[in-house]
Image (cartoon, grey):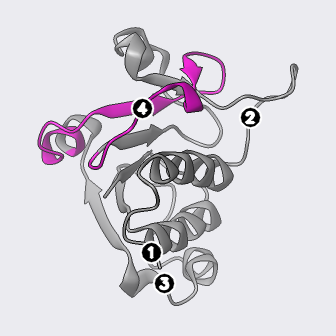
Amino acid sequence: MFHLILFEPEIPPNTGNIIRLCANTGAMLHLVRPLGFSLDDSQLRRAGLDYHDLAGVREHPGLAACVASLGGARVFAVEARSGACHTERQYRAGDAFLFGRETRGLPAELLADWPADRLIRLPMISGNRSLNLSNAAAIVIYEAWRQLAFAGAE
C-alpha cells in the first residue's frame, strides 16, 4: 500500500518499532545503507517483537537505488522544519515517505533539490527539535492510510 524509507537509520529500537508499524499497516519498509546497526541487533528484534516475519523489509545500497526500486512512486520527504503540513497533501496507494537519520535528519543537499510539493512536515510547538522517528512515521502513515479510508483494515 505505502512505502516507508529510512535514510541511514541509526537507532535500532526506532527501526524495530517501525517494522511493527509496517506489519500492522501493510506498508513496505525500505532501509537505505549504511545502517547504524545490524539487522540481527537484539534491540531491533526486541522492539519489533515477533512482527519481523509479518513486515516486508528491503535494504538498499543508497537512496537512488531505493527510489528506482519503487517504480515511479511519489516520494514525500518528511522534514521537521520545511514543507507543507502532512495533512495538506492528498496521498494515494503506492506513495512513499522518506525519513532522515535520527540525529541529523535528511542531508541539506538532498533537500535542496527535492520538489517543493513533495516536502512535508509535522506540526510541533515552536522551539522543539523533532519528534521521535518511529512516532513521526506512525503519524504520517496513519494519515495517508486514513485518506484511503483504511483500505484493507479489519
Q: Which residue is mark 1?
A: 23
Q: CA distance from mark 1 to mark 3?
A: 6 Å
Dot 3 crowding, Cα within 10 Å, few <14, some 14–19, many 20+: some
Sequence-first disc among 1 and 4? 1
Sequence-first disc among 4 and 2? 4
Residue closer to the observer: 30 or 83: 83
Given the image, on which type of amino acid does mark 1 rest? Ala
Magenta-span inclusion, residue 2: no
Q: Which residue is mark 2?
A: 130
Q: Which residue is mark 4?
A: 90
Q: CA distance from mark 1 to mark 4?
A: 23 Å
Whether residue 109 can be seen here: no
Nearer mark to the viewer, of 2 and 1: 1
Which residues, given as a range, are shown in magenta? 66-94
State the residue lying farthest toward the front: 149
> Which image quadrant for residue 48?
bottom right
Q: Which residue is mark 3?
A: 51
Given the image, on which type of amino acid does mark 2 rest? Ser
> Disc 1 vs disc 3: Cβ atoms closer than 8 Å?
yes
Magenta-span inclusion, residue 68: yes
State the residue lying farthest toward the bottom: 50
* Image height of 98 relative to 117, above or below: below
What's the residue at 51%, 90% (across, down)? Answer: 50
Percent x, y of residue 86: 56, 31
Dot 2 crowding, Cα within 10 Å, few <14, some 14–19, many 20+: some
Percent x, y of residue 130: 74, 34
Q: CA distance from mark 4 to mark 3?
A: 29 Å
Given the image, on which type of amino acid does mark 4 rest? Gln
Q: Secondary structure at mark 2?
A: loop
